[in-house]
């Protein structure tokens, strides 16, 4: 792969599609790749046969890659995801496969998505040409509650997602569905929830949508009060009504200690201090840091800066082409397992302390 850096706005977006066994992930992917809006997409899956592609194949284009009738390029996942992505890029550049402008990676139903996100962010040559766009997780409306109770992988899949696709809602009663939605809101209050109508979802609802939604202050109670941003964040810890499963016996007590902590800052931040804060958290508490994502307003920067971290890896910041809307506040979301908000806030206080 060429080592020439590509501007962030020109990097190919990559979306991760995950979901527990039987949650409808394969059905969703099968419907998506038939949609005209997916014609310029490369899909990386485990086995072609898993989504019944045989009658959609037009021709083998190179090695393990095939061209589907819809226009999608499809290939099997190698042991090394980075190698698969590099090979796709090189084949596109050599004209061996049709050009694609998006990649969707389907995981197995038992996969922990955090190491896969880590792989996408870790390899320098992959980061030069690809950018993580979103993590999408399918949730079974019928069996979702039981899976969250019994399967830690399903909890992680839901916790790190940017968008949750509710499947089989037509087969579940409304009481069960609403209970599941409340639990998901406690587990991952930042995620957008999209209902799949018998496996059908418009791709525009899932891909290349702002991955860091506005924080839902009225629903979660997780934002600091306006003004005095550093003092407020340093004071603020989850209270009894926060709804984030932070207290023993509270909502989400079965969810393996996974919590979501959101921070917002209404004044431009100093990058050196933010870097010390986030880098320190990744270094000392990486095992508990499932995912961090943020959009920062930094001093002396006219454009927003996106940051990501997965466990011990703090990804290099990326300056974006522009702000997605009129909101210029810095926003960070931490998805953690067994890491209290107080630890994050204390690390912030230390990093922001005057020399």
Image: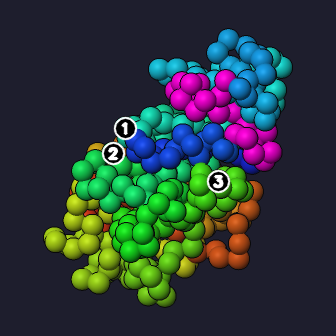
- Residue at image position (62%, 49%) is 133
- Residue at image position (56%, 25%) is 49
Cα distance in 3D space between marks 1 and 2: 6 Å
Of badges 3 and 2, nearer the viewer stands 3
Q: Can residue 273 be seen in the rendering of this structure?
A: no
Q: Which of the labelled discs sits on residue 153, or is there none?
A: 2
- Residue at image position (83%, 20%) is 95
Q: Which residue is mark 3?
A: 200
Mark 1 or mark 3: which comes first in sequence? 1
Percent position (x, y) of residue 166?
50, 59
User: Could you say which is closer to the camera, residue 238 or residue 328?
Assistant: 238
Which structural element holds mark 1? loop
Mark 3 or mark 2: which comes first in sequence? 2
User: Could you say which is closer to the camera, residue 115 or residue 6?
Assistant: 115
Callout 3: few (<14), some (14-19), or many (20+) C-alpha neighbours within 10 Å?
Answer: some
Callout 2: few (<14), some (14-19), or many (20+) C-alpha neighbours within 10 Å?
Answer: some
Q: How is the protein colored in the picture? A: rainbow
Q: Which residue is mark 1?
A: 110
Q: Identify whether 308 is placed above or below 266.
A: above
Q: What is the span of residues highlighted in magenta in the rendered image?
A: 33-54
User: Could you say which is closer to the camera, residue 305 or residue 98?
Assistant: 98
Percent position (x, y) of residue 132?
59, 45
Cα distance in 3D space between marks 1 and 3: 23 Å
User: Could you say which is closer to the camera, residue 120 or residue 135?
Assistant: 135
């Amino acid at each position: 792969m060429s080592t020439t850096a590509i501007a962030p706005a020109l990097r190919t977006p990559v979306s991760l599609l995950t979901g527990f066994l039987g949650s409808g992930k394969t059905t969703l992917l099968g419907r998506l790749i038939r949609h005209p809006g997916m014609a310029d997409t490369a899909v990386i899956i485990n086995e072609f046969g898993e989504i019944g592609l045989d009658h959609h194949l037009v021709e083998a284009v190179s090695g393990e890659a095939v061209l589907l009738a819809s226009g999608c390029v499809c290939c099997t996942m190698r042991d090394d995801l980075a190698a698969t992505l590099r090979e796709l890029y090189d084949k596109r550049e050599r004209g061996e496969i049709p050009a694609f402008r998006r990649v969707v990676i389907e995981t197995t139903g038992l996969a922990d998505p955090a190491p896969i996100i880590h792989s996408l962010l870790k390899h320098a040559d992959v980061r030069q040409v690809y950018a993580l766009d979103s993590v999408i997780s399918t949730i079974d409306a019928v069996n979702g509650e039981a899976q969250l109770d019994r399967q830690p992988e399903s909890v992680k899949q839901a916790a790190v997602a940017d968008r949750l696709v509710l499947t089989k809602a037509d087969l579940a009663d409304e009481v069960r569905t609403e209970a599941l939605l409340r639990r998901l809101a406690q587990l991952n209050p930042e995620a957008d929830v999209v209902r799949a109508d018998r496996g059908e979802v418009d791709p525009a609802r899932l891909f290349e949508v702002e991955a860091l939604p506005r924080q839902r202050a009225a629903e979660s109670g997780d934002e600091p009060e306006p003004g005095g941003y550093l003092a407020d964040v340093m004071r603020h810890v989850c209270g009894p009504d926060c709804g984030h499963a932070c207290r023993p016996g509270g909502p989400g007590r079965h969810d393996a200690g996974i919590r979501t902590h959101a921070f917002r800052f209404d004044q431009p931040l100093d990058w050196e201090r933010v870097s010390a804060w986030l880098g320190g958290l990744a270094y000392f508490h990486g095992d508990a840091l499932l995912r961090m994502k943020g959009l920062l307003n930094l001093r002396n920067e006219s454009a927003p800066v996106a940051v990501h971290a997965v466990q011990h890896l703090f990804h290099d910041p990326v300056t974006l082409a522009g702000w997605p809307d009129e909101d210029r506040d810095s926003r960070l979301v931490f998805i953690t397992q067994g890491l209290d908000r107080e630890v994050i806030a204390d690390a912030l206080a230390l990093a922001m302390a005057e020399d």
